[in-house]
Image (cartoon, rainbow, N blue to C red):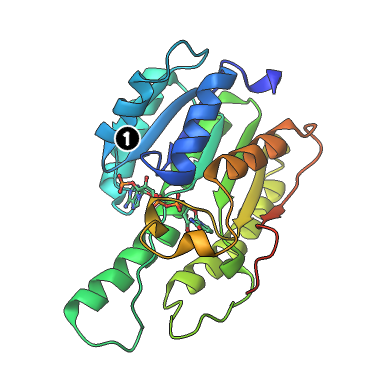
Amino acid sequence: MEKWVGKVAVVTGASAGIGEAITKDFAKLGINVIGLARRSEKIEKFASSLGEVLGIVYAKACDVSDLKSVKETFKWIEETFGTVNILINNAGVGYGVKILDEGDDVTEKLTETIDTNFTGVINCTREAVRLMKLSGDYGMVININDICGHYLPSFEEESLNVYAPTKFALTALSEVLRRELIEQGNDLIRVSSINPGTVKTEDNDDQDIEELPHIKPEIISDGVQYLLKQPPNVNITQLTMRPVGEKF
Ligand SMILES: NC(=O)c1ccc[n+]([C@@H]2O[C@H](COP(=O)([O-])OP(=O)(O)OC[C@H]3O[C@@H](n4cnc5c(N)ncnc54)[C@H](OP(=O)(O)O)[C@@H]3O)[C@@H](O)[C@H]2O)c1
């Protein structure tokens, strides 16, 4: 990991769950992290309790689904840090609704899911890759996808509504991005995805998750580090991390 020490990482959805775990581990490893979330005060809170760590955590309020918010955030990043070396597209939402449920509240949830999980990734990636290219340094984009981005597990009664389609789209987006970089002759920036199975986080804490095989967010952070540790000519494009015994 030495090559990333002192570099600049942006982690979206850093205020909870997997994003929080990645942010904390980066800081411990000496990577400077800009944590983005709507509730940036949550990032500030855990950052101040980290004690003596090698990297600095900066908390920045940003709604990844809002292009204006993303552009303002990356303008600030460019002016303050000059570049981005690592982007972790982690921010994501999922709601327990069905596409065919009626009501404006359902429409809003479906739209938010698409705007966050898919459009949000495009918004942040375009800005971050622009800065990576300016630096001429190595770069890494890691998308936190899902096993649901590759096949449809069947859950009794529960619909994967537009959540799974956004993650399928993310699978395609990752590969399209990798190919566009090759077409541009860029062999410094790599694109990878992690596909977690069930992870116990804020998002699913209210469910009977204790009864299901699950892994901790820190395990996904370990996966991120595994991807970053690879030699510059190795691009692990997909890493699936599931708890042992996961049935669906
Ligand atoms: N947990 C699992 O079992 C699991 C499994 C597979 C994949 N994943 C994926 O892993 C990622 C992280 O999930 P998690 O379980 O850690 O979720 P989580 O605990 O609910 O955290 C979600 C994070 O996303 C942020 N976020 C949501 N909407 C945002 C927006 N519009 N702009 C900026 N930040 C936003 C939240 O911050 P604010 O609310 O403060 O904005 C929060 O920090 C997601 O992409 C999810 O699909 C999770």
Relative to 147, is 51 above or below?
above
Q: How many marks?
A: 1
Relative to 110, is 135 above or below?
above
The residue depicted at 62 percent of the width and 26 percent of the height is 136
Classify mark 1: residues with Cα within 10 Å, few (<14), some (14-19) or many (20+): many
User: Type of residue at label 1?
Assistant: Thr
Which quadrant would the N terminus be assigned to in this image?
top right
Whether the residue under disc 1 has CB within 8 Å of ligand 1 = no
Which of 105/45 is in front? 45
Quadrant in the picture for residue 158 = bottom left
Residue reaching furthest to the left: 104
Residue 208 lies, in percent from the top left, at: 44, 65
The residue depicted at 76 percent of the width and 44 percent of the height is 235
Which of 30/136 is in front? 30
Quadrant in the picture for residue 186 = top right
Which residue carries the number 1 mark? 73
Relative to 155, is 136 above or below?
above
| Label 1 SS | helix
Q: Is residue 58 left or right of residue 72?
A: right
The residue depicted at 56 percent of the width and 15 percent of the height is 6
Which of 12/71 is in front? 12
Residue 238 lies, in percent from the top left, at: 70, 54
The residue depicted at 48 percent of the width and 68 percent of the height is 166
Tell me if residue 84 can be seen: no
Residue 120 lies, in percent from the top left, at: 40, 54
Which quadrant would the C terminus be assigned to in this image?
bottom right
Relative to 227, is 169 above or below?
below
Tell me if residue 3 can be seen: yes
